[in-house]
Image: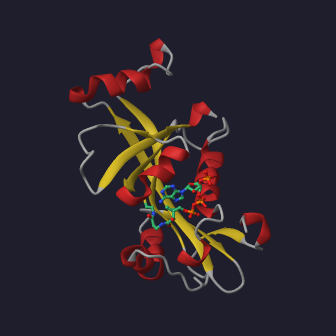
Amino acid sequence: MNVNDIKWKMTVLAPDIEILPFECADKDLNEFLQNDAKNYLNSLLATTYIIQNEEDTIAYFCISHDSLNKKDEEAAKWNKINRSIPNDKRRRTYPAVKIGRLAVATKYEGYGFGRLALKAVVMMYANEQQRAGCRFVTVDAYRSALAFYEKNDFRYLTEKDKDEETRAMYFDLKSI
Ligand SMILES: CC(C)(COP(=O)(O)OP(=O)(O)OC[C@H]1O[C@@H](n2cnc3c(N)ncnc32)[C@H](O)[C@@H]1OP(=O)(O)O)[C@@H](O)C(=O)NCCC(=O)NCCS
């Protein structure tokens, strides 16, 4: 079974949209969607996108503006990021969009909805008609999902967090 075998629709969350039941393994991610996503929207802090069929919320993600900043102690990593930026455009900070939360309901894991959500973010920003310039996608990835992001070409921003519960990762929108 994959995303093509299920009839789904992706919608940007709005105050009047009904959020259908959602359950993944992480309680905080479940609660965020039902209790907080609309408050974040109302406060202009994060925009949530939901993927639903007729019965369930299959997956959701939320995004906010972010920036990728040079950390002097991680010169090698920063040089790697800079290598893809023309010399005269190199800065200590670059515009980015952050995936604040991304979750797929347990029932629908492994069908490709996680990858579809990442692709949706990339497609929103990887074009020259963006409303505001944005070069990178960032995420603080849960340890259990690191391999998922690696598989989808996200890279580690630093080695300093390698033993932490979450790790800072980025994706270069110019790499597609
Ligand atoms: C991690 C998560 C988003 C993946 O979503 P998904 O829809 O199951 O993943 P997909 O079906 O799109 O998988 C895409 C690829 O990543 C792989 N993958 C998915 N989850 C993985 C994981 N946890 N570890 C390693 N690889 C993983 C799949 O095997 C697949 O690889 P393939 O194309 O070679 O077969 C989902 O399992 C989830 O929501 N987990 C709970 C919440 C969470 O951890 N969210 C991340 C917060 S940062």
The answer to whether residue 110 of the structure is visible from this angle is yes
> Residue 16: x, y in percent?
60, 82
Residue pictured at 39% horizontal, 60% vertical:
144
123 displayed left or right of 48: right
Residue pictured at 46% horizontal, 19% vertical:
83
How many numbered marks have been drawn onto this rendered protein structure? 0
Taking depth in this image into account, of 168 and 65 the one nearest to the observer is: 168
The answer to whether residue 13 of the structure is visible from this angle is no
Give the vertical position of 42 relative to 158 (above or below).
Answer: below
Residue pictured at 78% horizontal, 70% vertical:
5
> Residue 112: x, y in percent?
65, 61
Q: In terms of image quadrants, where is residue 60?
A: bottom right
Q: Quadrant of the C terminus?
A: top right
Residue pictured at 67% horizontal, 86% vertical:
55
Q: Quadrant of the N terminus?
A: bottom right
8 displayed left or right of 99: right
158 displayed left or right of 116: left
Q: Residue furthest left?
A: 73
90 displayed left or right of 124: left
Give the vertical position of 157 relative to 19 (above or below).
Answer: above
Give the vertical position of 131 relative to 72 (above or below).
Answer: below
> Residue 68: x, y in percent?
38, 37
Q: Residue furthest top?
A: 87
The colour mode here is secondary structure
Taking depth in this image into account, of 37 and 116 the one nearest to the observer is: 116
